[in-house]
């Protein structure tokens, strides 16, 4: 992707800019970060490929088993169990109290309020600029 080039290039550019500094510590740090982003990506892909392939195969097998008509009885049991779990969790007073508290605390958060207000203002300005709206 383009970020595989942009990130190391930006670190190398920062390293070159900081090279003028006599202590050179920032330059060395940026150079190490650039080389780390270049070499870590292929190494991580090499190590994570077996895990992701195994996970994908397992998930595909599970979905095939669930959707197969031979297992319709087990599928129905699974769906009823999930529906029962959801209905019991919705009726749980501890869960509803926790959700209420977290919702109220999020409403009282000044940063969240400012971000929501800025988003709303930006959306209104963009909408007012749209002639078809």
Image: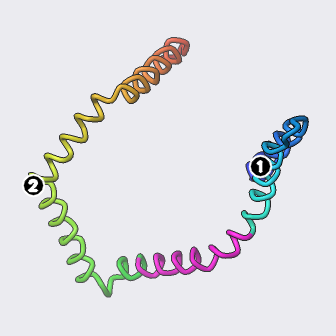
Identify whether 128 is placed above or below 18.
above
Which residue is situated farthest in the bottom direction here? 70
Q: Does the magenta stretch include residue 47?
A: yes
* Quadrant in the rendering for residue 100: top left
Tell me which residue sits at (77%, 49%) in the image: 29
Tell me the CA gap for discs 1 and 2.
54 Å
Question: Which mark sits nearer the N-terminus, 1 or 2?
Answer: 1
Circle on res. 91: 2
Residue 33 horizontal/vertical position (percent): 75, 52
Q: Does residue 121 appear to the left or right of 129 in the view shown?
A: left
Residue position for label 1: 29
- Mark 2, secondary structure of its residue: helix
Residue 34 horizontal/vertical position (percent): 79, 52
Question: Does the magenta stretch mainly form a helix, a strand or a loop?
Answer: helix
* Quadrant in the rendering for residue 110: top left
Tell me which residue sits at (22%, 68%) in the image: 82
Query: What range of the chain is rendered magenta?
Result: 43-62
Between 46 and 84, which is closer to the camera in this rendering? 46
Residue 22 horizontal/vertical position (percent): 88, 37
Q: Does residue 119 appear to the left or right of 48 in the view shown?
A: left
Q: Is residue 17 magenta?
A: no
């Amino acid at each position: 992707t383009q970020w595989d080039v942009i990130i190391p290039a930006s670190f190398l550019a920062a390293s070159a800019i900081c090279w003028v500094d006599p202590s050179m510590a920032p330059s060395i740090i940026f150079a190490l970060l650039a080389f780390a982003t270049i070499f870590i990506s292929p190494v991580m892909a090499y190590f994570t490929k077996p895990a992701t392939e195994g996970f994908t195969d397992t998930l595909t097998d599970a979905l095939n088993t669930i959707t197969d008509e031979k297992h319709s009885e087990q599928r129905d049991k699974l769906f009823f169990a999930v529906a029962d779990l959801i209905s019991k969790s919705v009726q749980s007073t501890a869960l509803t109290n926790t959700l209420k508290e977290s919702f109220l605390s999020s409403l009282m958060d000044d940063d969240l309020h400012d971000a929501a207000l800025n988003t709303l203002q930006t959306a209104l300005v963009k909408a007012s600029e749209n002639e078809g709206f």
